[in-house]
């Protein structure tokens, strides 16, 4: 019985950690970028935005700044309909920044497009 309860708890925890919301996508994207893990960050971007990141990394080499101690801090999020969202957060430099997100195939993705 204890094993069943533990299994249920772990399952619920796993599902709640993987919930797809603009905040979760923005958090995973910003923390990955801050650590310099562009491949992980691409999972939370649209294909077009990922292509822009590829071009930027090719041009800069390994010169992208890294902030390994960065922790995501959201100020607010706004969702329009079911497909567009904005997340305002504190950047690694301490500035207020905004990310644009779109829902593609049921998942929220960071986009550089309008």
Image (cartoon, helix red, strand yellow):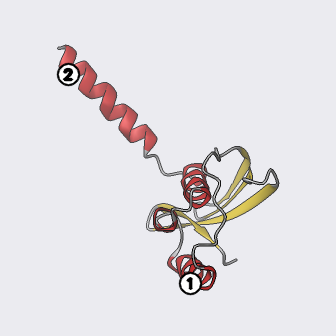
Q: Secondary structure under badge 2? A: helix
Q: Is 113 placed left or right of 97 in the picture?
A: left
* Residue 24, label in figure: none
Residue 39 image position (x, y, % from top left): 46, 67
Query: Most extreme residue toward the top, as rendered?
Result: 1
Q: Which of label 1 and label 2 is nearer to you?
A: 1
Residue plotted at (74% across, 47% down): 76
Q: Is 18 placed left or right of 68 in the picture?
A: left
Q: Secondary structure under badge 1? A: helix
Residue plotted at (53% across, 73% down): 46
Question: Residue 65: which quarter of the image?
Answer: bottom right
Question: Residue 62: which quarter of the image?
Answer: bottom right
The reply to whether callout 1 and callout 2 are in contact (CB within 8 Å) is no
* Residue 58, label in figure: 1
Q: Residues within 10 Å of mark 2 (few under 14, many from 20)?
A: few
Residue plotted at (57% across, 56% down): 35
For marks 1 and 2 on the same chain, the one whose residue lies earlier in the sequence = 2
Residue 59 image position (x, y, % from top left): 62, 85
Query: Most extreme residue toward the front, as rendered?
Result: 62
Q: For the residues marked 1 and 2, what is the alpha-carbon distance in whole angstroms? A: 49 Å
Q: Is 66 placed left or right of 109 in the picture?
A: right
Q: How many marks?
A: 2
Residue 112 image position (x, y, % from top left): 66, 75
Q: Is residue 86 above or below residue 60?
A: above
The quadrant the N terminus occupies is top left
Residue plotted at (38% across, 40% down): 15
User: Which of these two is toward me, 72 or 12?
Assistant: 72
The quadrant the C terminus occupies is bottom right
User: Which of these two is toward me, 71 or 49?
Assistant: 71
Q: Residues within 10 Å of mark 1 (few under 14, many from 20)?
A: few
Residue 110 image position (x, y, % from top left): 59, 66
Q: Which residue is mark 2?
A: 4
């Amino acid at each position: 019985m204890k094993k069943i309860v533990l299994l249920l708890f772990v399952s619920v925890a796993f599902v709640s950690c993987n919930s797809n919301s603009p905040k979760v996508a923005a958090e995973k994207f910003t923390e990955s970028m801050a650590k310099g893990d562009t491949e992980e960050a691409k999972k939370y971007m649209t294909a077009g935005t990922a292509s822009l990141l590829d071009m930027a990394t090719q041009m800069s080499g390994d010169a992208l700044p890294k902030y390994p101690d960065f922790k995501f801090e959201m100020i607010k999020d706004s969702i329009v309909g079911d497909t567009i969202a904005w997340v305002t957060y504190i950047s690694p430099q301490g500035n207020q920044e905004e990310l644009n997100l779109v829902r593609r195939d049921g998942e929220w993705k960071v986009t550089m497009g309008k």
